[in-house]
Amino acid sequence: MRIVYEPYEMQEIANKYREWGKTIGFVPTMGYLHKGHLSLVKEAKKNNDVTFVSIFVNPTQFAPNEDLDKYPRDIERDEELLKREGVDFLFYPTVENMYPDGFQTYVSVENLTQVLEGASRPTHFRGVTTVVSKLFNITKPHRAYFGKKDAQQLIVIKKMVENLNFDVEIVGLPIVRESDGLAMSSRNKYLNKKEREEAVCLYKSLQKAKEMIDKGTDDAETIKQEMRKIIEKYEIPKIDYISINSLSELKELKKIEKDNTLISLAVFVGKTRLIDNLWI
């Protein structure tokens, strides 16, 4: 595996592979890799001639009161995991390389970013879409891989790619979970023992929602109330939001729509904010 630090060098490498007729699979990450990330890498390896992974903790998607400085990092461990997976290139730029002095161009997707995570974290998605646009221009992928745990991010990026005519296929892959159902996340590292035990409430509330829908309940408010009851049984977790939206436009739904419903939630478990979701 070759590590590349400079955007222009990475771009030159990507251009050469395209000229040679090779397909590029790309997995953008913020590092501190887990099995969820590696599932994306495995899929990229399986379906492309060459695999690029980026590790970049992107400052523009963090608000001033968020955990940028504390965000977990372990580049040596990440490198070893990627080598084991047979990744061809790791793109590992600095903040100065990605946002040099005088940087003033941003990419924004409008309506889709005003709800859910966008309502709780108003500056978040502008940072995400800007950095992903830059990464696509640098790595020139034919396919880019994202996890469905960040459901809104995946939907927003698909819209950006469609609207701005990016020449890349966006591939969304299922959430990878711990044995008790907790969605894998780099932020799970922040949880102490009791918080980790109680964090399973997100998954349990989603399982309750699925059970209700399977039995014929389609009223969104009724489902949300039952999800709240499950989470409120626990001592530590505090709900930020529970929402039921259309997958196509992220509009709030009153009734479950088959093949077009996203049930999502954000919950503070101690100081750690966790998200999870269910695609119907």
Image (cartoon, rainbow, N blue to C red):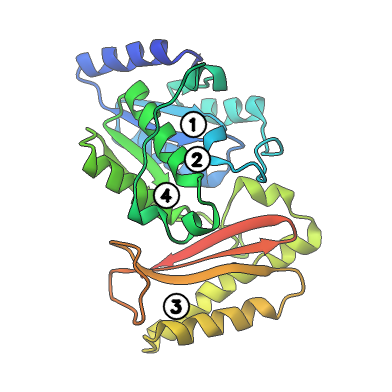
Q: Residue furthest right?
A: 193
Q: Which mark is residue 153?
A: 4
- Name the quadrant containing residue 179: bottom right
The residue carrying mark 1 is 85
* Label 2 or label 1, whichever comes before in sequence order: 2
* Label 2 or label 4, whichever comes before in sequence order: 2
**Distance Cα–Cα, label 1 vs label 4:** 25 Å
Kind of residue at disc 2: Leu
Q: Nearer the viewer, residue 84 or 250?
A: 250
Q: Position of residue 145 (x, y in %)?
A: 38, 41
* Label 3 or label 2, whichever comes before in sequence order: 2
Pointer 1 and pointer 3: residues touching (CB < 8 Å)? Answer: no
Asked whether residue 58 is in view, the answer is no
- Name the quadrant containing residue 59: top right
Q: Position of residue 105 (x, y in %)?
A: 39, 28
* Label 1 or label 4, whichever comes before in sequence order: 1
Foreground: disc 2 or disc 1: 2
Above or below, 12 against 228 in this view is above
Q: Would residue 33 be found to the left or right of residue 132 on screen?
A: right
**Distance Cα–Cα, label 2 vs label 1:** 8 Å
Pointer 2 and pointer 1: residues touching (CB < 8 Å)? Answer: yes
Kind of residue at disc 1: Glu
The residue carrying mark 2 is 38
Q: Position of residue 225 (x, y in %)?
A: 54, 84
Foreground: disc 1 or disc 3: 3
* Label 1 or label 3, whichever comes before in sequence order: 1
Foreground: disc 3 or disc 4: 4
**Pointer 2 local density, CA inside 10 Å: few below 14, some 14–19, many at least 20:** some
**Pointer 4 local density, CA inside 10 Å: few below 14, some 14–19, many at least 20:** many
Q: Which mark is residue 210?
A: 3
Above or below, 16 against 53 in this view is above
